[in-house]
Image (cartoon, rainbow, N blue to C red):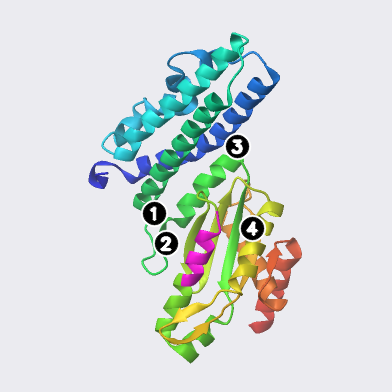
Amino acid sequence: MRSSETPKDEIRKAITVLDQELFNHNQWMDTLQMTLVCRLRPDNRDLDKDAHRHCRFGQWYYSEGGQHFRSNQNFVELEAAHKAMHERATALLCLLMEHEDISVAEYEQFLHEQRRMRLQMETLKHELEDEAFNLDALTGAFSRSGMLTRLREQQSLVKRGLETCIVVMMDIDHFKLVNDNHGHTAGDRVLAAFAKHVMSNTRPFDKLFRYGGEEFLLCAPHTDLETAHEMIERIRSELEKLAIENNGDEKLHITASFGLALLDPDLPVVDSIDRADSATYAAKRAGRNRVMVWEPSMTEAERSAAAARE
């Protein structure tokens, strides 16, 4: 994509559309499967030969907004995948309307096309994100410069009731000792290994940001506190087992403390970040290497501790 010809606000708008469409697609799939299983009357739009143009994603894709990305090969290939998926869905619904049986092979063909479409959409989304948000060269995580913009876009979806979102603050325990005892090169390896571990154990639409130093922030949409807590607890427990290469010396082992908070639709984004940070601080006070969910008492305890230090 020729970034000089595509304003970043258009790219970010496209990322938001793709986020919404992935969510909408999951809902559409649920409705389609219920229609097929319960033999309900299909939506007439799904029976149309141009169904791919009438769905919410198709309306955007063929609109003026979509024209900005016609030079992007992934964007072009997404059209074919999206159309093929709808054609398979229409074929299944026509069999339903004709009271014909749907074979396993026919349904598997539809599933293949919908998986191909999702992969193409996620590939395009990742490419746009790389262009819209600078990446941290050391860790491969997104840099802090695009973090607030990304979280505000996510918050707009939360406000509209389309999804919930969790922010997770992550702080590597005793990182200063790694630098002091093994050198800054080893510290860099630890940071890179930590980011890789987190990104390898989160979902494609979760976004990890280098917050600063040894701190990272994860934006986890389409989830609730309980589910996010389970995911982060797995990351934490596997992290302490991780052996990090140290240029031939004894391998390094690290732990981290994690704080979770809901991305509140009614507060500035920075307040939700502060809540996650307070939960991380509480995890460190409780002994480190643990996951804590924010509650109001944590913020008050942090303020009292800060006042006592002054």
The amino acid marked with disc number 3 is Leu
Mark 2 or mark 1, which is nearer the start of the sequence? Answer: 1
Where is residue 4 shown, x and y percent of the image? 23, 46
* Residue at 66%, 74% in the rendered image: 289
- Residue 55 falls within the magenta-colored stretch: no
Magenta region: which residues? 193-202
145 or 67, nearer to the observer: 67
**Circle 3 residue:** 162
Q: Say left or right for 50 vs 283.
A: left
* Residue at 65%, 77% in the rendered image: 306
Mark 2 or mark 4, which is nearer the start of the sequence? Answer: 2
Mark 3 or mark 2, which is nearer the start of the sequence? Answer: 2
**What mark, if any, has residue 133 been given in the picture?**
1
Comparing marks 4 and 2, which lies closer to the viewer? 4
**Circle 4 residue:** 231
**Circle 2 residue:** 143
